[in-house]
Image (tube, helix red, strand yellow):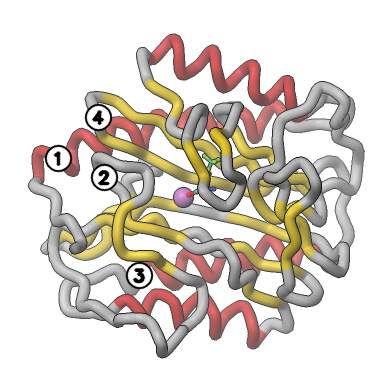
Amino acid sequence: MIVRKTRAELEKMRRSGLLVHKILQTLGKLVQEGISTWDLEVAAVRMMDDAGAKPAFKNYYVAAAGERYRFVLCTSVNDEIVHGMPNPKRILKSGDLVSIDTGVSLEGYFGDSALTVPVGEVSDQVKKLLKVTEESLELAIDKVRDGNRLFDICGTVQEHVESNGFSIVREYVGHGIGTQLHEEPQVPNYVDRRNENPRLREGMVLAIEPMVNAGRPEAKVLKDKWTAVAKDGSYSAHFEHCVAVTADGPWVLTRP
Ligand code: MF3
Ligand code: CO
């Protein structure tokens, strides 16, 4: 069942969304050569504490890993797709690409968002990867409208990414969100005709999160049980927003 939220519930999710936005903007500006992904974690913990928010990822149980996640951020560098773990030894250098993914809850309602930022000078191919991935999210956001169907979202991401020569990661997907971090439905970044294709209705909220590889689509998980990387070692980008279906069209909860 896809939970539909009332206006009052959406307003609560809005508060979480705006906090996640503020945290990601601050972290994005901290990113520069010489800082570590652990420095980002420390800054995020402090901002969540200051806001009285609960981190959504820390202690979150993920069946595929068979354990709880230990950090408030996922920081995925270069060929890491998602679930990269903050690490004081992971020092960012020029040419790197770092995805920062985080979530919080306030009064029991969740917000979840991600962005990917270049460190120093990156190659033209990496610039294009960032542009196309972010564009695919924006195009999909515009499809979050009453009466549209889930596949309109999935297909829009897929078409934009693949027509630009990049690959959709299949193993990780977006999701509904509300009083839980992950609710129904799953939101793949490609059309899988074996899945259901529900109609979108007012009050539904989707976390849309394209994960895009510059090379082949296949992912593998490292021995640490968490870090998902592109099997071929190609660069990977990730952007995410939570978007509500409203009478006035898409409402992106995770930005002003
Ligand atoms: N990247 C996932 C998402 O955006 C959440 C991370 S799962 C956790 O939905 F284990 F890190 F919490
Ligand atoms: Co998410």
Dot 4 or dot 1, earlier in sequence: 1
Q: Which residue is mark 1?
A: 9
Q: Which residue is mark 3?
A: 142
Q: Is mark 3 within 8 Å of ligand 2?
A: no
Q: CA distance from mark 3 to mark 4?
A: 27 Å
Report the front residue among 69 and 167. 69
Residue 91 in the image: state x and y as whole percent: 87, 30
Q: Residues within 10 Å of mark 4 (few under 14, many from 20)?
A: some
Decide: few, some or many residues near mark 1? Use Cα within 10 Å; few <14, some 14-19, many ≥20: some
Alpha carbon distance from label 4 to label 1: 10 Å
Q: Are marks 1 and 3 in contact (CB under 8 Å)?
A: no
- Residue drawn at x 29%, y 25% as measured from the top left: 106
Amino acid type shown at disc 4: Gly
Q: Label 3 crowding class (10 Å Cα cut-off): few <14, some 14-19, many 20+?
A: some
Task: Using the image, tell me which numbered label, if any, was put on residue 97.
Answer: none
Q: How far, Cα to Cα, is label 1 from label 3?
A: 22 Å
Tell me which numbered mark, 1 or 3, is placed earlier along the sequence.
Answer: 1
What is the distance, in whole Å, between disc 4 and disc 2 at their CAs? 8 Å
Is 105 above or below relative to 204?
above
Q: Which residue is mark 2?
A: 178
The total number of labels drawn is 4
- Is 199 left or right of 237, judged from the image as shown? left
Provide the residue designation for mark 4. Answer: 108
Q: Above or below — where is 195 with respect to 51?
A: below
Give yes or no for contact between labels 1 and 2 (Cβ–Cβ under 8 Å): yes
Of the image marks 2 and 3, the number of the one nearer the N terminus: 3
